[in-house]
Amino acid sequence: MLWDDFMNSLHRDWRGDGKVDDQLENPEWIHEWMQRHRLRADRLPDAEQIASLKKLRERLYRMSKAFVDKLMPEDADMDALNERMALGQVIRRLEIAGEGRYILGLVAVDEGWTAIEAEISSSFSQMLAEGEPSRIRFCDNPNCLWVYYDDTRNRSKRYCDDKMCGNLMKVRRFRARKKAEAAAAVSSRESSDDSER
Ligand SMILES: [Zn+2]
């Protein structure tokens, strides 16, 4: 989806110390992201537009954090999201979705970064309106914090990817347990040494 792909442009080193790589500073990433979501602008964002995109991303993070904490988002964030959407006009358009199936879509009238910000805001809002905000998650790996929508039946998805972060955390828990066991063995040996004296 557009909203989470956009939010995850703030990419953390999930294996290590959580070093942050901001893909909004990476023209190549932006270009690919635009293609993935068919976003139209005749040029890459300039410094001011990048700053504005980052502000929108912060807002989406703050709102997502509220949902993760089972709170309501702040009014100011809701208002700002509505303001962003008001700046991007759309028209209704009927399209063929597959054999015998049609969708009524909203197509952006304008090109450019204001329209793209409206699209991102709309993608997030649509998820809130048609999905369940309580399914928004941050990856349980504290170095990762990838944002995703948990669409599992029993709402049990804890990691962005079980093979990556899930596995890494399992290995870490295992090592921590082994270390604790080794420390306990050492301290019990020390205390038995003491008693021999
Ligand atoms: Zn993760």
Image: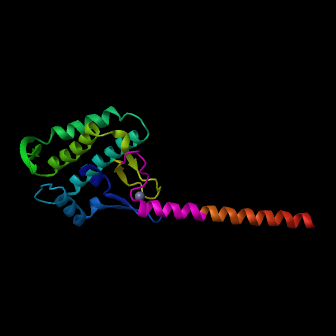
Q: Position of residue 55 (x, y in %)?
A: 29, 47
Q: Position of residue 155 (x, y in %)?
A: 40, 45
Q: Is residue 72 visible?
A: yes
Answer with the quarter of the image where residue 72 lies.
top left
Query: Which residue in the rendered view is the most extreme toward the right?
Result: 197
Instruction: Name the colouring of the figure.
Output: rainbow
Horizontal side of residue 67 vs 174, given as left or right = left
Q: Position of residue 9 (x, y in %)?
A: 30, 57
Query: Which residue in the rendered view is the most extreme toward the front?
Result: 100
Q: Position of residue 89 (x, y in %)?
A: 10, 41
Q: Is residue 109 visible?
A: no
Name the quadrant where ligand 1 sits. bottom left
Out of 114 and 73, give the one closest to the viewer: 73
Residue at (7, 49) in percent of width and height: 96
Residue at (15, 54) in percent of width and height: 39
Residue at (88, 64) in percent of width and height: 194
The correct choice, above or below, for 179 with respect to 103 in the image is below
Q: Is residue 19 magenta?
A: no
Write the start and end of the magenta stretch as one range.
152-175
Horizontal side of residue 178 vs 115, given as left or right = right
The correct choice, above or below, for 109 with respect to 32 in the image is above
Tag count in the figure? 0
Q: Image quadrant for the C terminus?
A: bottom right
Answer with the quarter of the image where residue 13 lies.
bottom left
Horizontal side of residue 127 vs 68, given as left or right = left
Horizontal side of residue 48 vs 178, given as left or right = left
